[in-house]
Image (tube, rainbow, N blue to C red):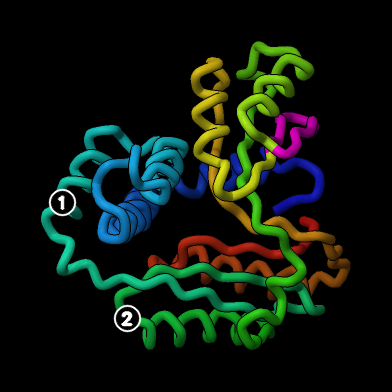
Amino acid sequence: MSGHSKFANIKHKKEKNDAAKGKIFTILGREIAVAVKEGGPDPNNNFKLATVIAKAKSNNMPNDTIERGIKKAAGDVGNVNYEYITYEGYGPNGIAIIVDTLTDNKNRTAANVRSAFTKGQGNIGTPGCVSFMFDKKGQIIIDREECDMEFDDLMMVALDAGADDISEEEDSYEVLTDPDALETVRKGLEEAGVPMVSAEVTMLPQNYVTLTDETAVKNLNRILDILDDDDDVQNVYHNWDE
């Protein structure tokens, strides 16, 4: 996450995803399966599933792939044994890191996450040790070049749909919502013809930390790269100002 250009970071992540679509689709497939197990196969009556579908679409997952995943999960509910586990810890120079995982083997995942921190000179902390430094928000990113609306008009559409705030970035607009209002706001923007780069619940740092030591930067990047390559890892949040 960057304190300056959120869209640049989103593009960077999408490029990495495009280079490993098999991984991101596998991750999304797991999320769909868990959402269906918890709330059923109808996204109109299952907010969690609707949110995962929106996330899948923002990652260019084909509609037929999404539908197949829902149908498969609906017919295989008893065999879905994934669970969400969140880890918190510190990278070099006290950088706060939150790692969301979805796993069918928590011992494997715990060992892999701990190894990633250790290899980058960081350490796992106790639950809650860094999450208080973040705010849980629904976040929608809009590419300024793709959006034909003037900012004032876009702001009115977003606020009317239930958004908490909207801001202008260098190359994008950022819409923030209550996590529970994300899907409603996303639908409102979609109906207004607003193209969205991403729409997801995220953890936003209250403050960012700058690293000037090259070794610390190298070690932090090592932690993030190892976590990014782990199929059990869903999301990684940190307060490093890249």
Res 36 quadrant in image: bottom left
Q: Give the number of the disc on residue 105.
A: 2
Residue 173 belongs to the span the image colors magenta: yes
Q: Give yes or no for contact between labels 1 and 2 (Cβ–Cβ under 8 Å).
A: no
Count of numbered marks: 2
Q: Residue at x 75, y 60 (%)?
A: 205
Of marks 1 and 2, the one in the foreground: 1
Query: Residue 241 is drawn in which quadrant?
Result: bottom right
Q: Between residues 201 and 101, which one lies in front from this camera angle?
A: 201
Q: Secondary structure at mark 1?
A: helix
Give the vertical position of 134 relative to 183 (above or below): below
Q: Is residue 236 left or right of residue 44?
A: right
Residue in view at x 31 percent, y 60 percent: 38
Q: Which residues are magenta?
A: 164-175
Picture quadrant of residue 196: top right
Residue 123: x and y, percent? 65, 86
Regarding mark 2 in the picture, which secondary structure is present there?
A: loop
Q: Give the residue type at disc 1.
A: Lys
The stretch drawn in magenta includes residue 88: no
User: In the current view of this chain or complex, which residue is farthest to the front?
Assistant: 45
- Which numbered disc flags the more N-terminal residue, 1 or 2? 1
- The relative height of residue 241 versus residue 16 in the rendered view (above or below) is below
Q: Percent x, y for residue 2?
A: 75, 51
Give the residue number, with chain letter if any, for mark 1.
72
Q: Is residue 191 visible?
A: yes
List x then y, in percent, for residue 221: 66, 67
